[in-house]
Image (cartoon, rainbow, N blue to C red):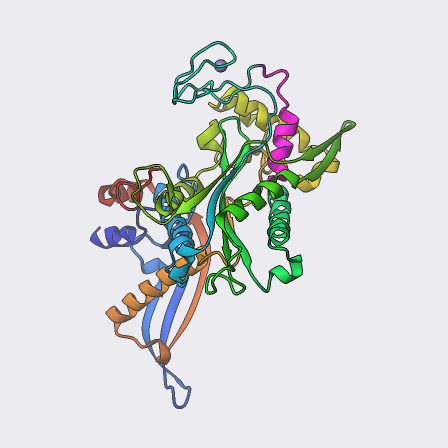
């Protein structure tokens, strides 16, 4: 029992670990002759307390694995933060580069119940005549579902990724134009980098939040040119977002085309962490992006956190009529041969969106992979220190095969006894 507890505690709270069958052997190697010597350490999964090697699931969704999603959220927080104030291999000078936080929305697909706010922050009546409460489930749902453009709503989500790519190309063009440079010449003066996250609005449309930064020609290591200001960047973003357009499919004689909605919010990011709450700080931006990185469609619209296998499953689910209709629309469109490339059935639970939740340009900051590697390296170093083996004189041979997922009932019960509730510590989740 104590040995099983020790193995389970190594999972850091993951509730759906991957189970592996196999073995790992460490041999002593003579560095002079290259000869393989005695066995230093041998591990066989059958001799482990759980009968398998257990590895964290690393799912980013809070609804799937709270502990692994929490690790993902913290990594995203560090990734965004290092691009804003340096650290993790990014120079601190990036804090002085022009940086903005921008939110790109989807266009309207029909009027929805909302909570309009007046100039003094007062809440006004919805078009339906009601004064909706902040957590009213009606918010974001169509005033008239029969005239709401579900087809365009789902197809917009399916084209949101390509639309962002188009925007990022236009943005570099608009920045170059304002600096009086050609696009080719721009690369010798400045680089535009970004980190973005997708979030579902209550109505089920994907929108993007992005940190966008201008650096010098070599990225964060080099100072941006004097013309590069947050104002120029903001202006270029507005122009590029307005111009970005992606042609979609023709469905039953109707030609779809996609563009961002008119609501575009661009704000300059300040360095100070305390400023009376008026300005957007680095910390608030990083916390905001990290929070959305661990959510899918399920948190905003009450949709699903996993793919649907049969449409019949939809009837059994406790989801809103609006979410049901979005999923059904994706499923129906997914049957069309000419829309095959959008894989709408596989992504129906995501309301058609099949892009990555968080993406960044190469020069923005470090990567999630680098953070994971650093963590694994640290654990390896700790283990080696404990075992007193030298990596330079050790040969490791290992072979593992998949043996299942999850914990047995007894293991789950034991694991619960050692877990503090996830998300009760760490970085701020406000913002
Ligand atoms: Zn997990
Ligand atoms: Zn209403």
Q: Is residue 217 above or below residue 210?
A: below
Name the image quarter holding the C terminus. top left
Q: Name the residue rendered at 61%, 31% in the picture.
A: 154
Left or right? Give the position of 324 relative to 1. Answer: right
Measured from the top left, where is residue 251 in percent x and y?
Answer: 74, 30
Outermost residue to the bottom: 33
Task: Pick the residue in front: 105 or 53.
Answer: 105
Q: How many marks?
A: 0
- Residue 212, visible in the rendered structure: no
Q: Would you say residue 147 sits in the magenta stretch?
A: yes
Left or right? Give the position of 395 relative to 334. Answer: left
Q: Name the residue rendered at 62%, 47% in the picture.
A: 165
Outermost residue to the top: 129
Q: Would you say residue 249 sits in the magenta stretch?
A: no
Measured from the top left, where is residue 260 in percent x and y?
Answer: 60, 35
Task: Pick the residue in front: 314 or 4.
Answer: 314
Task: Pick the residue in front: 353 or 192.
Answer: 192
**Magenta segment main secondary structure:** helix
The answer to which quarter of the image holds residue 322 is top right
Q: What segment carries the magenta color?
A: 144-160
Left or right? Give the position of 369 relative to 241. Answer: left
Outermost residue to the left: 2
The answer to which quarter of the image holds residue 326 is top right
Q: Is residue 100 above or below residue 30?
A: above
Q: Name the residue rendered at 26%, 71% in the picture.
A: 385
Q: Name the residue rendered at 38%, 55% in the picture.
A: 85
Task: Pick the residue in front: 275 or 265.
Answer: 275
Measured from the top left, where is residue 380 in percent x and y?
Answer: 33, 66
- Residue 48, visible in the rendered structure: yes
Measured from the top left, where is residue 336 in percent x and y?
Answer: 72, 33
């Amino acid at each position: 029992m104590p040995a099983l507890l020790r193995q389970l505690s190594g999972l850091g709270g993951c509730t759906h670990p991957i189970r592996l069958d196999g073995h790992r052997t460490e041999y002593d190697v003579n560095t002079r002759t290259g000869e393989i010597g005695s066995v230093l350490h041998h591990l066989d999964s059958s001799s482990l307390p759980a009968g398998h090697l257990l590895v964290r699931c690393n799912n980013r969704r809070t609804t799937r694995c709270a502990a692994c999603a929490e690790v993902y959220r913290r990594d995203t927080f560090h990734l965004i933060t290092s691009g804003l104030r340096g650290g993790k291999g990014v120079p601190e000078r990036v804090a002085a580069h022009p940086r903005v936080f921008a939110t790109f929305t989807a266009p309207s697909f029909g009027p929805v119940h909302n909570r309009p706010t007046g100039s003094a922050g007062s809440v006004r009546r919805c078009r339906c005549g009601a004064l909706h409460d902040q957590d009213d489930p009606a918010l974001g749902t169509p005033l008239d579902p029969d005239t709401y453009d579900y087809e365009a709503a789902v197809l917009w989500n399916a084209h949101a990724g390509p639309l962002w790519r188009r925007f990022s190309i236009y943005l570099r063009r608009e920045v170059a134009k304002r600096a009086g440079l050609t696009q080719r010449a721009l690369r010798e003066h400045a680089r535009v980098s970004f980190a973005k996250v997708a979030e579902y609005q209550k109505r089920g449309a994907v929108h993007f939040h992005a940190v966008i930064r201008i650096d010098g020609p070599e990225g964060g290591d080099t100072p941006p040119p004097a013309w590069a200001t947050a104002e120029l960047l903001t202006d270029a973003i507005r122009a590029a977002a307005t111009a970005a357009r992606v042609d979609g499919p023709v469905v039953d004689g109707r030609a779809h085309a996609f563009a961002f909605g008119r609501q575009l919010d661009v704000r300059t990011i300040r360095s100070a962490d305390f400023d009376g709450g008026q300005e957007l700080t680095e910390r608030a931006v990083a916390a905001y992006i990290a929070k959305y990185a661990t959510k899918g469609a399920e948190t905003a619209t009450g949709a699903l956190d996993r793919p649907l296998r049969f449409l019949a499953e939809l009837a059994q689910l406790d989801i809103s009529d609006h979410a049901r209709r979005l999923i059904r629309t994706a499923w129906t469109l997914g049957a069309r041969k000419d829309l095959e490339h959008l894989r709408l059935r596989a992504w129906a639970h995501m309301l058609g969106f099949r892009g990555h939740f968080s993406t960044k340009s190469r020069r923005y900051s470090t990567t999630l992979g680098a953070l994971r590697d650093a963590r694994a390296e640290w654990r390896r170093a700790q283990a080696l220190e404990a075992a007193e083996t030298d990596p330079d004189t050790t040969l490791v041979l290992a072979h593992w095969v998949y043996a299942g997922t999850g914990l047995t009932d007894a293991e789950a019960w034991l694991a619960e006894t050692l877990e503090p509730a996830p998300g009760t510590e760490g970085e701020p989740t406000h913002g």
